[in-house]
Structures are given as structure tokens and as C-alpha cells.
Amino acid sequence: MSVEVKQKEALFSKKNQKLLSDPFNDNNPITVQVLGICSALAITVKLEPAVVMSLSVMFVLAAGNVIISLIRNLIPNRIRIIVQLVVVASLVILVDQFLKAFAYDVSKQLSVFVGLIITNCIIMGRFEAFALGNGPWKAFLDGIGNSIGYGVILIAVAFFRELLGSGTLYGQPVIPQSWYINAETGTGFYANNGFFLFPPMALIVVGLIIWGQRAKNTKLVEEN
Amino acid sequence: MNVNSNAYTYTFATVMVVLVAVLLSGASLGLKSRQASNISQEKRQSILASIGIDVERSESDAAFTEYIKKSLTIQGGKVVSEDANAAFDIDMAAAIKADNMDRTVPLYVAEKDSETFYIVPMRGKGLWGPVWGFVALESDGNTVVGATFDHKSETPGLGAEITTPMFTDQFPGKKISEAGEFKSISVVKAGTSSGNYAVDGISGGTITSNGVNDMLVDCLAPYAEYFKNI
């Protein structure tokens, strides 16, 4: 093992800070790696589930990354994907069981995400690409960084979909009632765009975000 | 140690599976009673919510004894038992497997401001899992005073909207029978409902809305038979 010869690194060294900030822009899991798209489609109709999902992914990804990183030298190479799957699944189920017993209302909010978290490719992707080859602290930072990068996009997409699709933000109406077209009185000029409630609109919004990001950050643009 | 040898791989897999199994079943067994009490408190809370009584989950047991005067067990339109605990413990998931006129189902009789209400439990299929709810009827056994719905895993923002006031507030005032003939309340395409026997579904949540529609027909029918004779 080469641990002894390595110089001790500061907790928040430049390299470690990059682990946190990279997924935010240059290496964003959704807009650059295009991972976790399915959950970005499924739960971005409203802001609230998007926020809950982001927080849950943050917890599972950080904790799972640390666990995988701790046992990384013990995992047989040939069954590593199954081991990763077992770690995520048991972590999520365990948390769900505890919430059901001690924080029932939170668990009701979360129950629908359990399946979505287990199958979220970002989690498996980070275990495979990062936690298997790095120490626990770095893996923890990587988990937090990636889940923030994921959450930011999720919340941005949910913001537009909820605002334009339902005329609310976080369940609160924001479009004045008087703007809405009223067939009886013949007033108003505005109607919610129901198309935003459907998954294709999430893809289009993600696409627009990717476009905007690449226009600003040209090093992400591939050569053809 | 060679972590890639067959023997090690098998040992690792076995140890991991056993450890995880012990951990998960331990957690499940240890937390079961707390979870069960949360669930029955929540059931009492939603039964009360259907007649417009909002209580905290922790206070629902006391409020339930205060408002719910009788819990009957109904089969084929007739009362077969008046044992309150037996009625409350009926597992709707199992009960709805029987044909709807043969099944044994509970009916809660509530009294609020000296008016009598009948609360009908229901359960059906959504898109991803079960949906269930309670519909409260006035003493005529026909006019709806309130409804609550819940679900296991419908899509947030789409099917899951059946739990919100936007959907449930349409129910008060609707009727389930016309001139003694059972009609049920249909859940129709959003924005097209009219009259006393239809409510708007959720746009983008069509399969869940249809599930609620089928559940209403299926679960109200046996009670409509009973209400004919009250």
C-alpha cells in the first residue's frame, strides 16, 4: 500500500475543492455526462418532489460513496456491480424503514423515490467511476458535488415546468388569477401550458440548459 | 490474499448477503410495531378528514372514538357484524379480491354536529400501485360530503395529484345514485366534467384517474345496495 509515502493532503485542498465544484459545471452529471435523465423527466413536474429527490440523492450518494470506498479493496472485481447495487438498495431501504417508524410524514413523501433512487444511474456511475478508486473523504466530497450538480439541474427544470405548466411555484400560485382566460367574463389573456406537465418538455428544457451551458463554456463543445 | 479468486468471490458474496439480510430483517422486525401504529393512526386520520375533521396524526385515535359512533361490517348489502375492531381491521387489499357484491367490507358511521355521515372505504389500482381512499356520504346515503384519496407510488405531480384539494374538493355535493339506481361518480377528462355524477380527472395522470374511476364504481356498489334500505 502506498498510503504511507503519500503526503498528507489538506481536507479542502485545491484538488478536493475541484471534486465539489466540477460536477456543478464542467462535469455536470445531467448536462455533460447525461446520466440520471429518467428521474429528471419523472419528477420535475413540481418543485417540491424535485427538491426532495435532490436531497435524498445527496444522502444516498454521499453515504454510498463512503461505504464503497471503505470496502473498495475487498470487493471482488467480477461481482462489483452487484455489490454496489446491494449497497445502494440496502441503504435506501434501511432509511425508508426508519423514516416509516420515526418520521412517517417524511417517509410518505419519499416512498415513491425509493425505486427511483436505487435505479439512478448517477449513483452507480459515481460508485464505479470514483468511489472504487479513491479514499472515503474524497469519495464523500465527490458524492456531495455530484448530487448538487444533479439537484441544481433538477430544480431548474422543475422551476420552469411548474411555473409554465401549473402557474405555481412550490405549490403557491404565482400567476395572478386575473390573467387567466375566463370564458364566462371574456377577460384574461393567459393559460397554463399543459404540455409542460408531460415528460417530453423536461427533455426540451434540459436540452435548452445544455445549449446555454455549452454556449458559455465552449470547451464542452465536441469537435466534429 | 487474492480478491479475484473464485473462493474469495463466493465467500464475499455469501457474507455480504447474510449480513445485509440480517440487517434489513432486523430493522424491519424491530420497527414493525411503530410502523403499524403510524399506519392505523393515519387511516383514522383520513377517515376523519373525509367528513372535514382535520386532526394531527398523534391525536387521531382520540378523535376517532369521539366522532365515529359505529363501525359496521357489510356483506351483500346487509350488516353482518357491529364489532368496531373487526370492521377497522378488515384488510381492504384482501377484501376487494372477492366479487364486489360478495365481499365483506367496513362502513363507518360518524356523527358530527348531530348529523349522521356514512364513510365508505375504497381501494383500487393506480398506475404503479394501489390507490385507496374514503368517501363520506350524507345520511341519505347518496350525496357526497367529502372524499380523501391516497396512493402508494403514483407519479408526483401527475397521478399523485389525486390526494390534493384540487381533485378532492370536486366531490362534495356529487351523488352516487339517481332515483335509487346506483350510478357512481365518473372521473372524466380534465375540464369536461359536468353535472352531479362526474368530476375532472388529472391531466397527465390518465391511468391513475381511470383507476380512481373504476375504484369508485367497484367499491361504492355494495354500499349503494345497503343504502337503499336505510
Image: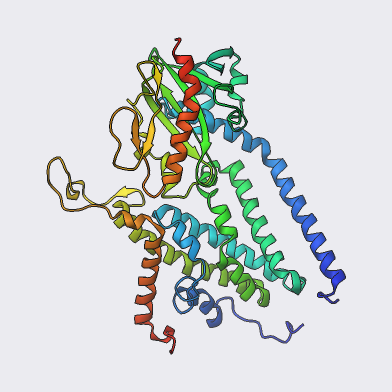
Query: Where residue A85 sits in the image (x, y, percent)?
Result: 67, 62
- Residue B2's spot in the image, x, y percent? 84, 77
Quarter of the figure with the N terminus of chain B: bottom right
Eyeballing the image, is B174 above or below A81?
Answer: above
Question: Where A212 sits versus B47, above or below?
Answer: below
Q: Please state the horizontal and vertical placement of residue B219, each as a whole percent of the image.
A: 50, 27
Q: Is residue B85 above or below residue A40?
A: above
> Does the rendering let one see residue B217?
yes
Q: Residue at 56%, 13% (x, y): give it.
A: B79
| Residue sitting at x 38%, y 59% | A158
Q: Quadrant of residue B93?
A: top right
Residue B221 placement (x, y as % from top left): 48, 23
Would residue B58 be visible to someone looking at this image? Answer: no
Outermost residue to the left: A186
Total numbered circles: 0
The answer to which image quadrant residue A65 occupies is: bottom right
Image height check: is A211 above or below B173?
below
In which quadrant of the rendered image does the C terminus of chain B lie? top left
Viewer-side residue, B124 vs B62: B124
